């Protein structure tokens, strides 16, 4: 990403702030309309505030944000000036406005046309073809070349599928039909389909909320709170990284930005106290990846899940909450065992903030409380986010320490626009992919292949879908990765009797975990760069610390107490057995419980942890007894399991 300077920098950043404010205004207008409808004056408010039609909003969204991609991201690193866009960048930025502006202006006409019956006009064809090419280039530049390749392959499959054999054979699609499907048929999907609509309305508001929360100093609150809670204990910086990344990640929703923001502080502290660079990077990558799993925000993909499944977002965060806690519990105990094995100290006393410092920013949790309350009361995500943004501005103004200046507000809006631009093109690309999967029938073909390989076994089906999600998620941002994998995998899980929310949470977890899973793990790469470590080694350590995600992912299918379903006894039993399994796995990989473990004992701990976590053929009571029995023996009979080599 370029760092723009001089008058051009002021111009582009001012434009970005204006675009973000436009989204805030239109999102707020929609939220106010929702409130007004309850009072019977919705039509008046809609007319006064200018609430747009959904398709108009999608056109405005891409027309305003997509130019930022070409202005902020060069075609190739070093290929153009680092502090200003090239002439070609300006040309592409201006060109990409026209296709979306056409959608905005002609929204009513497009809504009224009959898809695949009304002919595509020449202007629509050339605008659509140009938009597809510009979108591919925007994704390649700013999001991920892998995602651009997947979009291109999806389009190619629509054209060449008519000549493919067997279940891969499709009905004929000529180039105009491909353009129509991708550009001007918003009901099916495509660039301006429902997925882009989710980003343009709800997710954009949550990105703005996250930016305002951080602009008010909540990131400082998370950091000081994490340090105050865990800094005085063995391996303090690693534990601080776990707590801070979990808190920050639930607001940012981006694993990479989470790594960069919190890792810049925690990784050097971990290295200074004795953690190897790859281990320090792995801890931060795993903790930052989990931010997308932690309610109340959970990143953009969770809002897409709510829209796809029509399950209220409040129900999703309730079902995901305990699993996220178990994920961070596992990382926390793993870094604790690692610190004990290495004999690492706590943070220095002068580096640990006092509770007075934490309390100075405590009022900044008010917006988060407002957000959670509205979500749990089943208000729309758009309204909840808008109310939380208003609350964040008011809360920040309560003290001079957190009050936001005009410059801070502008920087906050600019940051939000840059994030929205990336997500806008990524999700538009995912819309093209899902549209191609749907109209060609590839979803059905993929389902037939996977079901054939699974042979009626739900366990084998889950393994195949997990691998699919991890592979498709390599190098692809979480939201489009989830959209693609959910489109492929969730219908098959439903055929095997898995309920709708469990199926989507399963696919969601593995789309998220792809960010920390080698060989292509973007969160691990970012952490390795900060730590000065080998990316592959960092990724392997991140995978070790993030193994809890694999356990929780399968629990959504087999141990539904983790979703707070069933009796209190069932929920408690399943939570405890998963906690015991995760503690055993963490102790085994660290080779330390109360004392260093012999190699055979470490292997036993991992094996028993895996049996407790995945031994669904056994009664819950047996799994619970095996988990806590093994932990008790290793903890209270250390002579049987320890090694004299303290450096092992």
Image (cartoon, rainbow, N blue to C red):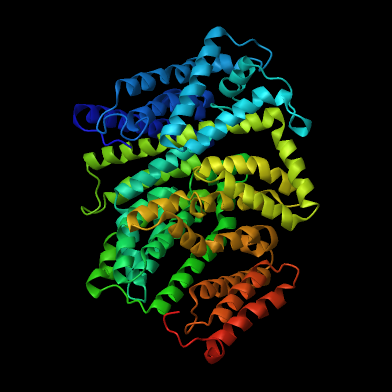
Looking at the rendered image, the quarter that the N terminus falls into is top left
Q: Nearer the viewer, residue 570 or 77?
A: 77
Q: Which residue is painted at 51% across and 14% down in the image?
A: 106
Q: Nearer the viewer, residue 473 or 33?
A: 473
Q: Nearer the viewer, residue 302 or 565?
A: 302
Q: Quadrant of residue 310?
A: top right
User: Residue 299, relative to residue 360: is it above or below?
Assistant: above
* Picture coordinates of residue 69, whole percent (x, y): 38, 30
Q: Nearer the viewer, residue 162 or 261?
A: 162
Residue 459 visible in rendering: yes
* Picture coordinates of residue 259, whole percent (x, y): 38, 53
* Picture coordinates of residue 534, whole percent (x, y): 40, 57
* Picture coordinates of residue 122, whole percent (x, y): 55, 8
User: Residue 568, relative to residue 157: is it above or below?
Assistant: below
User: Residue 76, relative to residue 232: is it above or below?
Assistant: above
Residue 44 visible in rendering: no
Q: In screen coordinates, is 281 left or right of 170?
A: left
Looking at the rendered image, the quarter that the C terminus falls into is bottom left
Seen from this angle, which residue lies furthest right?
456
Q: Quadrant of residue 8?
A: top left
Q: Which residue is painted at 35% across and 44% down in the image?
A: 211
Q: How many marks?
A: 0
Q: Which residue is painted at 34% across and 31% down in the image?
A: 74
């Amino acid at each position: 990403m370029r760092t723009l300077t001089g008058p051009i920098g002021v111009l582009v950043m001012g434009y970005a702030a204006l675009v973000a404010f436009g989204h805030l205004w239109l999102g707020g207008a929609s939220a106010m309309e929702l409130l007004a409808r309850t009072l019977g004056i919705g039509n008046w408010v809609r007319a006064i505030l200018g609430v747009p039609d959904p398709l108009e909003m999608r056109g405005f969204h891409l027309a305003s944000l997509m130019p930022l991609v070409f202005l902020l991201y060069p075609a190739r690193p070093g290929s153009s000036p680092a502090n200003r866009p090239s002439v070609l960048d300006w040309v592409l930025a201006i060109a990409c406005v026209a296709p979306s502006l056409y959608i905005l202006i002609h929204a009513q006409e497009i809504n009224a046309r009959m898809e695949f019956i009304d002919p595509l006009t020449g202007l629509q064809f050339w605008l659509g073809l140009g938009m597809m090419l510009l979108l591919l280039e925007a994704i390649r530049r700013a999001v991920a070349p892998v995602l651009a390749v997947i979009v291109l392959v999806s389009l190619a499959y629509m054209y060449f599928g008519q000549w493919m054999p067997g279940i891969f054979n499709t009905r004929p699609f000529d180039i105009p039909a491909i353009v129509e499907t991708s550009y001007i048929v918003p009901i099916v999907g495509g660039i301006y389909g429902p997925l882009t609509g989710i980003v343009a309305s709800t997710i954009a508001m949550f990105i703005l909320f996250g930016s305002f929360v951080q602009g008010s100093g909540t990131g400082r609150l998370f950091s000081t709170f994490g340090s105050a809670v865990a800094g005085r204990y063995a391996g303090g910086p690693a534990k601080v990284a776990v707590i801070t990344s979990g808190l920050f990640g639930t607001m940012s929703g981006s694993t990479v930005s989470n790594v960069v923001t919190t890792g810049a502080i925690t990784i050097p502290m971990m290295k200074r106290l004795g953690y190897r660079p790859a281990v320090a990077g792995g801890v931060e990558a795993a903790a930052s990846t989990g931010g997308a799993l932690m309610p109340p925000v959970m990143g953009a993909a969770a809002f897409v899940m709510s829209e796809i499944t029509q399950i209220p977002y409040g129900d999703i965060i309730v079902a995901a909450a305990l699993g996220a806690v178990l994920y961070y519990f596992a990382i926390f105990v793993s870094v604790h065992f690692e610190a004990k094995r290495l004999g690492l100290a706590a943070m220095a006393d002068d580096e640990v903030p006092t509770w007075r410092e934490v309390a100075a920013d405590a009022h900044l949790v008010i917006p988060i409380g407002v957000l959670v309350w509205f979500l749990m009361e089943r208000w729309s995500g758009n309204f909840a986010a808008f109310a939380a943004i208003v609350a964040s501005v008011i809360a920040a103004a309560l003290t001079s320490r957190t009050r936001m200046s005009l410059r801070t507000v502008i920087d906050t809006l600019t940051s939000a626009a840059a994030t929205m631009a990336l997500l806008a093109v990524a999700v538009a690309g995912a819309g093209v992919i899902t549209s191609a999967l749907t109209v060609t029938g590839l979803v059905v073909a993929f389902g037939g292949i996977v079901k054939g390989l699974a042979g009626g076994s739900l366990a084998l089906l889950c393994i195949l879908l997990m691998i699919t999600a991890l592979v498709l998620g390599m190098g692809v941002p979480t939201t489009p990765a989830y959209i693609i994998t959910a489109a492929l995998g969730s219908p098959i899980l439903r055929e095997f009797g898995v309920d709708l929310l469990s199926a989507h949470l399963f696919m969601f977890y593995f789309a998220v975990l792809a960010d920390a899973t080698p060989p292509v793990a973007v969160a691990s790469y970012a952490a390795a760069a900060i730590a000065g470590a080998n990316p592959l080694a960092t990724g392997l350590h991140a995978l070790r610390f993030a193994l809890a995600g694999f356990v929780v992912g399968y629990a959504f299918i087999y141990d539904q107490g983790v979703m707070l379903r069933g009796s209190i006894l069932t929920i408690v039993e399943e939570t405890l057995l998963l906690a015991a399994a995760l503690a055993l796995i963490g102790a085994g990989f660290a080779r330390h419980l109360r004392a260093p473990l012999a190699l055979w004992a470490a292997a036993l701990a991992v094996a028993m942890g895996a049996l407790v976590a995945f031994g669904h053929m056994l009664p819950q009571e047996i799994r619970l007894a095996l988990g806590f029995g093994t932990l008790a023996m290793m903890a209270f009979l250390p002579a049987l399991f320890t090694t004299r080599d303290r450096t092992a």
